Amino acid sequence: MVSAPEPGRPYRVALVAFPGIRAFDVSVITEVWGTDRTDRGAPAFDLRRVAPDLSTPVPMRGGLSLHPDRPLGWLTDADLVVVPGLDDHLSPAPPAVLDALRHAHTRGTTIAALCGGAFTLAQAGLLDGRRAITHWNLIDLFRARHPHVTVVPDALFIEDGNIWTAAGTAAGIDLCLHLVRLAHGAETAATVARSMVTAPFRTGSQAQFIEHPTPRADRDADALAAVREHALRHLHEPLTVAGLAARAGMSPRTFARHFTAATGTTPLRWLLDQRVAAAQRLLERTDLPMPEVARRAGFGSEVTMRQHFASRLATSPRAYRAAFSTAPAPAPAGSSPIAR
């Protein structure tokens, strides 16, 4: 569970820095939490670069360096600790960094690792007996080095015991946006994603990589993209896999196979994910009654919507609204939740 900050202060994020961290991951963390978007309705973030030694810049590949601004003790003040990946995944992290991560976890602080940052958490012993993920090309190495960790090969990001790990490169963006969504709501995550010109919603259960080896596959992908766009504009209507397959000009079995190959998830799971996301936006933006939110998001009933919120978000629609609602005026009747 990712908690929101205390009222009246910015959300505190600690970027753990030591020699060998990947510049790309540092850039992602900085772009998500180090940019002021309060003029667009996003909350204030307080991102700090935390390192064992404040007097020495942290070297990174490509001639880059990072200037830390807080000591490791600041991890105890953070709401979220994020560990970048490594250029050399077997390089040992400084003992002081490992001790600080253990202490933060003991205090209940949420900790996230991007890509090969899972190796750092494993060095600290924080992943023993837990489920974790890293870049698909590092899975065998990770298993060999850390046999007490249960590696989940087909995921973008996962959580176990308030510790998050992500797959390679772009999956780090997905995890960061997901953490924003959990702490501040879907609308804030969408605001950050729009400013980064990236997709606002990819679930952690999707496959790590998708191949399109032939022109035919590309044509199928175009057809599937049109079907997904149609579904997003008509979430409030009854949608079936068979109906979506017919729109794509495929049999249901062929459609399901190509859809999974193109998106990394099944049509039904994708549709439910989008309906949950639509309901989140309606709960944040409007004061519509729960049955109407359920109808517009395509759940059919408040009971069904409540069941999916419990299984996917570990909360109820009412609790979600209480935490994230901005309480604007109700949306016009009959409009699509996506079109707004």
Image (spheres, rainbow, N blue to C red):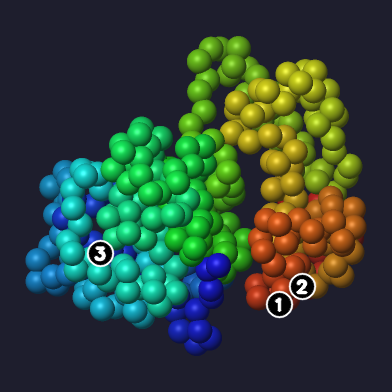
Residue 107 visible somewhere in the drawing: yes
Q: Amino acid at mark 1?
A: Ala
Q: Please provide percent x and percent y for residue 7.
A: 53, 86
Q: Position of residue 63 (x, y in %)?
A: 13, 47
Marks 3 & 1, CB-CB < 8 Å contact: no
Viewer can see residue 192: no
Q: Are marks 3 and 2 in contact (CB under 8 Å)?
A: no
Q: Earlier in the sequence, mark 3 or mark 1?
A: 3
Discs 1, 2 touching: Cβ within 8 Å: yes
Name the side, left or right, on which 240 lies relative to 147.
Answer: right
> Which residue position is annotated with label 3?
98
What residue is shown with label 2?
A: 318
Between disc 3 and disc 1, the foreground one is 3
Q: Which residue is pictured at 71% across the width and 48% down the height?
A: 274
Please rate how many residues cluster around mark 3, counting C-alpha atoms within 10 Å: few if below 14, some from 14 to 19, many from 20. Answer: some
Marks 3 and 1, how far apart in space?
37 Å
